[in-house]
Amino acid sequence: MTILRDLSVLWSLFHILILFILLYRSRYPRKKTYILTVIFMTPLVALNVAGLVLYGIELIGKVFLLTCTLPSFVFFWFMSKDRKGKFLFTFCLADTVSYWIIAATGLVDFYFGGGKYILMFIGRLVLFPLLEWAVIRFLREPYRELQESAARGWGLFAGMTALYYLLLAIMQNYPVMITKRPQELLSFLFVMTLMPMTYATIFTAMYRQLLFFRRQQAERMLLEQKNALEARLESQQRIQKMKHDMKGYTATLSGLLAEGKTEDARTYLKCVEDETDALLKPYCQNPYINAVFVHYAGKFEEMGAVFRHDIWIGEEELPYMDLCRILSNGLENACDALKELEKEKREAAVYMKYNKEYLLIRIKNTCRDDLHVEEGTLPTTDKKGGGHGYGLLTVKEAAERLLGDMSCYTKDGMFILDVMVAIAAFPGGQQQNKNLCGDPCS
């Protein structure tokens, strides 16, 4: 009947792999991830199953950490998009939960199945697919959302899961199998009972983090709507003022022309034109994006900040919703950072230019001397703290929707946010490339 034992081990290893793939985030496309995983894991699993057949479960159980766990850990660490605590927690979560099923079905078979491996085989045959269904149904999407949103707090959870895995492995196999140490069985059962309770606590804490992140997203959306409404209100007020003043301008021009003072009328008209341009502040031709710049230029002016801009946006059709979201969150973070500085140190700048197949956006602002952000990382501060980080996830999500990416870092006392979005994501796609660039492209 050892064939059932060997098949159950092979089945378990296969489903440990499936469980981990369901939870972790690879840095490669799905097809490449599957190909590399099959190439590496197939011989590794075959080697461990062969060792089980040749040397027995007791010896393989003692060296399993070295023959399977550590090699697969190194391989998936290389494949994973995440590093440090996120990856370690995900890896240990899949291994520990699977190890729990393996240990539990082994004990049930030994004490209630006469050691014939029938209950072991049936239990694993049912429990692993059931576990994967539960993960897909309830855990996968919120867990991946949490991986995307929560940058801190993973180290403690990862350490707990790693210790549980080592504890189960040691108590199960050293110095001999737990079934040969009945005097320690009660302690082992207590550990087996405590582990699900601990995971329930961990996932409760994670769920609260997820709810907090969703609340932050809702607050960011409300802030964007508030800023958009304020910009629209300011625009309407300027238009109403222009309409009111235009009556006076028209009357004056009519009077000058009626008196034959053509040159005076031309001079007066030029003054009216200059005043209108100053009132409208045309940062770019797109009215939606221009409204964002007008709003934040006003905020920078109120706080006494120097605001520079170099914007090459014409009247072409743009995905203005996502672009406005990127600009609003980036400029809002800049405002928050500048509020913490002395007035004479407040500077901000925005650059928007086309370059080949991409629209490039750079938002710069002076920041605190102690703020250090490495390129490729996201600062995880809030509105009360470091002045950056609150809306950067929203910027990243919007950039990815436009087939682009973002990065941020500090350099020479400046916080720099770079966003690149693909022209192919614009209405009309790459057909607009030549129309979009024109002379300003560099």
Image: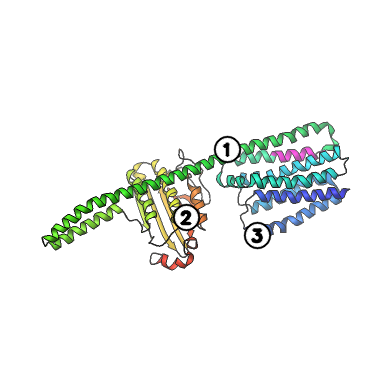
Quickly name the residue at label 2: 419
Mark 3: few/some/many CA within 10 Å (<14, 14-19, 20+): few
Per the model, the C-alpha gap separating discs 3 and 2 is 27 Å
Is 293 left, or right, of 383 in this rendering?
left
Label 1 belongs to which residue?
Answer: 208
Quarter of the image that includes the C terminus? bottom left
Image mark for residue 323: none
* Chief secondary structure of the magenta portion: helix
Tag nearer the camera, 1 or 2: 1
Answer whether residue 388 is visible to the viewer in this image. Answer: no
- Give the amino acid type for the residue marked by disc 1 in the picture: Arg
Q: Residue furthest left?
A: 259
Crowding around mark 1 (Cα neighbors within 10 Å: few <14, some 14 to 19, many 20+) is few
Label total for image: 3
Calculate the distance from the C-alpha at mark 3 to the C-alpha at mark 1: 33 Å
Choose the circle earlier in sequence order: 3 or 1.
3
Q: Which kind of residue does numbered mark 3 sit on?
A: Lys
Query: Residue under circle 3?
Result: 31
Q: Between label 3 and label 2, give the one nearer the viewer.
A: 3
Magenta span of residues: 163-177
Q: CA distance from mark 1 to mark 2?
A: 31 Å
At 75% from the left and 36% from the top, the residue drawn is 192
